[in-house]
Image (cartoon, rainbow, N blue to C red):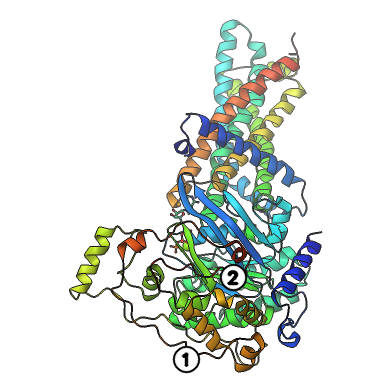
């Protein structure tokens, strides 16, 4: 029964999203292999009196890669755990292929979880098993594969994550970065439809992080899985995802196409992307206006605020390794984004238009770009407005029809252009 | 721990008790779910046996001796020497053996179970297992609970035998009792249900010790220190629980099974 339901939802989703796109470009390579769709609505979570986040609404379109940003302690890990039903949210829905994991029965929950591959923040390997058995565990539990077949798959995944030769080691005997990679290998072993990664890059060196980014994109091209990555790595956030969201002050302040966040002039986003002290984020999550004024004064007097250069602006997205199939998620996304283009802010729109080929532009009926977008944003240092920042997360004020759009466009900042 | 989040005193304790019960029910359900984790069960049974057999044996001998000596001297003061054997056997088989067993299973086996599961919880292994679609209760807790119950029953048998032998030795050798009278009084007072109820008690104590240990292990206070606290609490809670349950069971048994010398 569960299968029937999910099939239905997928079919509906597909029809809605790429109704008129060219068939050749849009049909997935393997029917039914498309990643799961995640619809989250009004999700709210608190521990006792401590509210973590409220009213989170977002949509992970099937097969697309999304990144969730946010200062430390804003509840990103809690969000991932709520998505897989490890923590019970107080309110809201989280539907995976049409099954609401917040309210469904335990049996359904266990079935739904089999669609997931989850990389925990510190690997969460089974301490009493060596790496081989750790990676083989899901296969042995959920498939009837023979031991030779298990061996082939496990060794392949270990090789993929650069761990060949370490299969006999116990998790206690390897470095943190290796544990992370082994955790990823275990998450990938069942070819999941949804991959959740909690800080895949923490504990990895820059080179391994680059390989890992490429690995995730290649994987997405091959199995068309829906991927959600929680990270603090700005470089990864700029180059890997299709969509970016950000949690701040107990709310999802934005979630939408990568171009929107990368060109945003919200002070929080700007500060976070550039890694500056100047801005609304403080050492403890929120800053008061006195502290902000003091820091602004110091910066004006020439004190360095910790950033190097403005890294906002749209950079080219990471592509699958040559020879791999095109990412179906990216193809579907073009149609999806073209549909909501008119609701996006100016810089993001230009960026998206610039990333399309002339044929695609003609197909979607989009005019040629007036200016070459994708160029860097001008530096924004010094235009912070304390009053503006303080009222930032007000209640969402979306028009009803935009709620049903696959992703939410950025809320305009008050007083902005 | 949870009393902090409520204003009514005692409500937190009530809630914990409820959750403990819920886990007990889950475990009961998990016992009948396939596939049964035979390997884990055997490993755990072996482990619990290996940490409990020696201390149990060492405790059982002096325990049997103390009961036998005490009872022997009391009986001789009352002029009932012929019942010395029977009395100490009854006390050993019905009361001492299950309690000694339970204390050791809880103290040695339960604390190990709690520490093991607690460490897995804070390392997110339990979460990872749940996410891989495998129930941690069915996979980890059920084999441990069954192993604990099995070992408790076996240990109880062992303590009974060692206790009775020890009692015999001390009574006959040290107090100058006659072997014939000691053995004869066995069957005068003791009856087979005494042994059964002892074993039943051990079974239930083993279950309780393992469930409490697993519960505290699955819900430890945060942090590595939390696991230490959880182990500590699990042993204390189990001890308290065992003595209450023992009292209740003894009362019921004395009501239901008529004593032999009515
Ligand atoms: N089990 C729990 N019980 C109570 N509070 C919790 C629990 N788990 C997390 N929290 C609280 O929720 C908040 C968010 O934690 P979370 O681990 O999700 O942060 P995060 O965004 O992942 O941070 P980081 O980027 O540092 O990993 C923290 O304030 C934390 O204290
Ligand atoms: Mg985290």
Q: Where residue B240 sits: x, y (%)?
A: 54, 29
Q: Residues within 10 Å of mark 2 (few under 14, many from 20)?
A: many
Residue B233, given in percent of the width and then of the height, sits at 49, 38
* Contact check, label 2 and label 1, Cβ < 8 Å: no
* Identity of the residue furthest to the left in this view: A301
Q: Residue at x 69, y 55 (%)?
A: A109
Using the image as rendered, state which of residue A358 and residue A329 is in the foreground: A358
Count all numbered tags in the image, as a single digit.
2
The answer to whether residue B90 is seen in the rendering is no
Task: Residue at 53% x, 50% y: name it.
Answer: B118
User: Residue A240: x and y, percent?
Assistant: 53, 80
In terms of sequence position, does the residue under pointer 2 or pointer 1 come before the other? Answer: 2
Q: Position of residue A67 (x, y in %)?
A: 52, 72
- Tell me the quadrant of the picture where the C terminus of chain A can be found: bottom left
CA distance separating discs 2 and 1: 49 Å
The answer to whether any part of residue A138 appears in the image is yes
Characterize the local packing of mark 1: few (<14), some (14-19) or many (20 or more) Cα atoms within 10 angstroms.
few
Residue A405's quadrant in the figure? bottom right
Q: Nearer the viewer, residue A71 or A77?
A: A71
Quadrant of the frame with the N terminus of chain A: bottom right
- Tell me which residue sits at (44%, 76%) in the image: A234
Q: Which residue is mark 1?
A: A372
């Amino acid at each position: 029964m569960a299968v029937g339901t999910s099939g239905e939802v997928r079919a509906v989703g597909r029809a809605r999203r790429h109704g008129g796109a060219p068939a050749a470009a849009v049909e997935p390579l393997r029917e039914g292999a498309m990643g799961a769709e995640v619809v989250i609505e009004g999700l709210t979570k608190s521990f006792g009196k401590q509210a973590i986040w409220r009213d989170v609404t977002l949509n992970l379109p099937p097969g697309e890669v999304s990144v969730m940003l946010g200062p430390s302690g804003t509840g990103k890990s809690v969000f991932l755990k709520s998505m897989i039903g490890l923590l019970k949210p107080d309110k809201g829905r989280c539907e995976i292929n049409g099954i609401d994991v917040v309210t469904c029965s335990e049996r359904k929950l266990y079935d739904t979880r089999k669609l997931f591959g989850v990389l925990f923040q510190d690997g969460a390997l089974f301490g009493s098993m060596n790496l081989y058995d750790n990676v083989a565990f899901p296969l042995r539990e959920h498939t009837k594969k023979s031991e030779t077949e298990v061996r082939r798959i496990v060794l392949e995944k270990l090789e993929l994550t650069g761990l060949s030769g370490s299969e006999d080691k116990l998790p206690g005997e390897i470095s943190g970065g290796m544990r992370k990679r082994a955790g990823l290998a275990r998450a990938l072993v069942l070819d999941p439809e949804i991959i959740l990664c909690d800080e895949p890059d923490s504990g990895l060196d820059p080179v391994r992080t680059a390989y890992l980014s490429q690995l995730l994109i290649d994987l997405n091209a091959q199995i068309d899985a829906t991927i959600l990555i929680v990270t603090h790595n700005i470089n990864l956030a700029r180059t890997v995802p299709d969509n970016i969201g950000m949690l701040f002050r107990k709310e999802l302040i934005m979630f939408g196409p990568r171009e929107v966040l990368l060109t945003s002039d919200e002070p929080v986003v700007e500060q976070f992307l550039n890694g500056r002290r100047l801005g609304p984020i403080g050492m403890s999550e929120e800053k008061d206006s006195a502290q902000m004024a003091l820091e602004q004064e110091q910066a004006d007097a020439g004190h360095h605020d910790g950033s190097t250069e403005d890294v906002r602006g749209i950079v080219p997205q990471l592509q699958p390794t040559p020879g791999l199939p095109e990412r179906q998620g990216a193809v579907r996304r073009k149609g999806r984004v073209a549909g909501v283009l008119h609701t996006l802010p100016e810089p993001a729109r230009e960026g998206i238009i610039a990333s399309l080929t002339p044929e695609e532009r003609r197909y979607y009926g989009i005019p040629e770009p007036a200016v070459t977008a994708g160029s860097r944003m001008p530096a924004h240092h010094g235009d912070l407005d304390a009053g503006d920042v303080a009222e930032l997360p007000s209640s969402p004020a979306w028009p009803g029809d935009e709620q049903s759009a696959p992703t939410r466009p950025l809320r305009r900042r008050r007083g902005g252009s | 721990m949870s009393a902090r989040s409520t204003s009514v005193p005692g409500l937190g304790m009530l809630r914990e008790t409820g959750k403990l019960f819920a886990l007990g029910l889950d475990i009961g359900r998990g016992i009948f779910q396939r596939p049964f984790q035979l390997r884990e069960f055997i490993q755990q049974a072996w482990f619990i046996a290996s940490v409990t057999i020696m201390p149990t044996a060492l405790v059982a001998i002096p325990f049997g001796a103390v009961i036998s000596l005490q009872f022997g001297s009391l009986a001789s003061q009352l002029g009932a020497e012929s019942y010395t054997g029977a009395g100490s056997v009854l006390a050993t088989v019905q009361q001492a053996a299950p309690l000694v067993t339970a204390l050791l299973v809880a103290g040695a086996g339960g604390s190990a179970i709690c520490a093991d599961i607690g460490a897995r919880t804070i390392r997110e292994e339990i979460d990872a297992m749940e996410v891989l679609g495998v129930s941690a209760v069915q996979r980890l807790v059920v084999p441990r609970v069954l192993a604990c119950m099995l070992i408790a029953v076996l240990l109880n048998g062992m303590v009974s035998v060692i206790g009775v032998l020890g009692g015999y030795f001390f009574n006959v050798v040290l107090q100058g009792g006659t072997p014939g009278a000691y053995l004869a009084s066995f069957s005068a007072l003791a009856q087979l249900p005494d042994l059964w109820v002892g074993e039943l008690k051990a079974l239930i104590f083993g279950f309780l010790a393992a469930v409490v240990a697993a519960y505290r292990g699955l819900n430890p206070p945060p942090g590595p220190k939390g696991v230490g606290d959880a182990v500590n609490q699990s042993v204390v809670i189990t001890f308290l629980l065992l003595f209450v349950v023992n009292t209740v069971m003894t009362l019921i048994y004395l009501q239901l099974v008529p004593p032999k010398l009515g």
